[in-house]
Amino acid sequence: LYNYANIAVQLYKSRCTVVQISLYNCTNLAVQLYKSRCTIIQISLYSCTNLAVQLYKSRCTIMQIYLQM
């Protein structure tokens, strides 16, 4: 996944079923999600923190977030 648009699409299609994402543009951010009845149509990504917040508000279960700076 090289851009945020692809991430949004991937999450939407997978419906948050065990998704692992590496964001090279976000200093190696890895997000693992477990299945949840979640609908992600669009995500505004201004920072790694916003990604986590958006996913949380979308009612996905965020198991763990790794931020390596």
Image: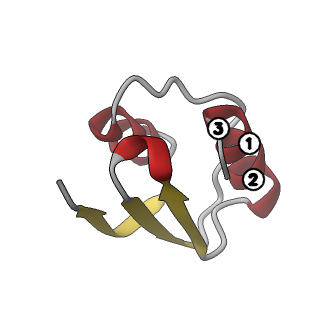
Q: Position of residue 13 (x, y in %)?
A: 82, 54
Give the CA separation, mark 2 to mark 1. Answer: 6 Å
Where, by quadrant of the figure, is residue 15 drawn?
bottom right
Residue that numbered label 3 is attached to = 3
> Type of residue at label 3?
Asn
Give the CA separation, mark 3 to mark 1. Answer: 6 Å
Residue that numbered label 1 is attached to = 6
SS class of the residue under badge 3?
A: loop
Q: Are marks 2 and 1 in contact (CB under 8 Å)?
A: yes
Q: Position of residue 64 (x, y in %)?
A: 31, 71
Disc 2 versus disc 1: nearer the observer: 1
Of residue 66 and residue 3, the one placed in the foreground of this image is 3
> Type of residue at label 1?
Asn
Disc 2 versus disc 3: nearer the observer: 3
Q: Residue furthest left?
A: 69
Q: Position of residue 32 (x, y in %)?
A: 46, 71
Q: Residue furthest right?
A: 13
Figure coloring = secondary structure
Residue pictured at 41% horizontal, 40% vertical: 51
Task: Say which label, 2 or 3, has the lower sequence index.
Answer: 3
Where, by quadrant of the figure, is residue 8 drawn?
top right
SS class of the residue under badge 2?
A: helix
SS class of the residue under badge 1?
A: helix
In the picture provided, is 47 more to the left or to the right than 24? left
Q: Are marks 3 and 1 in contact (CB under 8 Å)?
A: yes
> Type of residue at label 2?
Gln
Give residue 10's mark: 2
Residue pictured at 66% horizontal, 72% vertical: 17
Within-10-Å neighbours for mark 1: few <14, some 14–19, many 20+:
few
